[in-house]
């Protein structure tokens, strides 16, 4: 569901819905080699103060969720790094695994190599994202040289 449409970020009639614009903006800010889940994006945008998310802002308290983020990415995400907005289980987007995998390898996104258990996705040689190491929390982008070889931020004790 993540941004594989041919329309890129062009909405019908040239007008992009405000929430879609915010989702796409956040997708563009995710640093190379890092990912956010659909739920992470929704939570980040809800906490950021979207008027629909907060009753005190006059929005009626409607919160956007992972499904809405997935819908935005499916409809408008082709012009942004769609491969950085992912499923929470780290499984690559069905139908776009090879394209996404090429991006992940180019960017150094941490992956879990396949276990090759008979009958599993891994048997077909399709790794998963290493969510513990690849997940980005929306803070400022990593600075150059702040990653180890696996793409995770350096942690100094």
Image: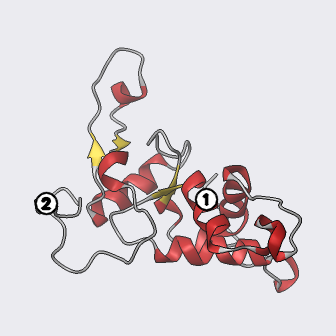
Please, which residue is most extreme toward the front here?
Answer: 56
Q: How far apart in space, not on screen, are marks 2 and 1 (Cα)?
A: 29 Å
In front of the other: 70 or 57: 57
In the shown orientation, is residue 92 left or right of residue 95?
A: left
* Percent of width and height locating residue 31: 38, 72
Q: Is residue 3 visible?
A: no
In the shown orientation, is residue 132 left or right of residue 69?
A: left
The quadrant holding residue 8 is bottom right
In the shown orientation, is residue 1 left or right of residue 133?
A: right
Q: Residue at x 35, y 77 (%)?
A: 141
* Percent of width and height locating residue 24: 62, 73
Instruction: State whether residue 115 is above or below residue 97.
Output: above
* Badge 1 element: helix
* Percent of width and height locating residue 45: 63, 68
Q: Residue at x 30, y 66 (%)?
A: 107
Query: How many neighbours does mark 1 have within 10 angstroms: few (below 14), some (14-19), or many (20 or more)?
Result: some
- Give the label, 2 or 1, closer to the camera: 1
In front of the other: 109 or 133: 133
Please, which residue is most extreme toward the bottom here?
Answer: 14
Please, which residue is most extreme toward the left here?
Answer: 157
Q: Which residue is mark 1?
A: 43
Disc 2 + disc 1, Cβ < 8 Å: no
* Percent of width and height locating residue 106: 29, 64
The quadrant holding residue 157 is bottom left
Please, which residue is most extreme toward the top here?
Answer: 118
Q: Which residue is mark 2?
A: 149
In front of the other: 118 or 19: 19
């Amino acid at each position: 569901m993540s941004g594989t449409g041919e329309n890129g970020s062009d909405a019908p009639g040239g007008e992009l819905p405000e929430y879609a614009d915010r989702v796409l903006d956040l997708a563009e800010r995710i640093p190379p080699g890092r990912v956010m889940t659909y739920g992470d994006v929704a939570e980040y945008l809800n906490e950021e103060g979207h008027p629909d998310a907060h009753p005190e802002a006059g929005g009626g308290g409607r919160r956007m969720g992972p499904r809405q983020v997935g819908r935005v990415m499916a409809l408008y995400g082709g012009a942004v790094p769609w491969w950085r907005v992912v499923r929470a289980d780290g499984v690559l987007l069905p139908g776009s695994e090879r394209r996404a995998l090429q991006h992940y390898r180019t960017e150094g996104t941490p992956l879990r190599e396949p276990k090759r258990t008979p009958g599993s996705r891994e048997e077909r040689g399709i790794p998963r994202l290493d969510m513990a190491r690849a997940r980005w929390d929306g803070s400022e982008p990593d600075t150059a040289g702040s990653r180890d070889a696996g793409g995770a931020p350096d942690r100094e004790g």
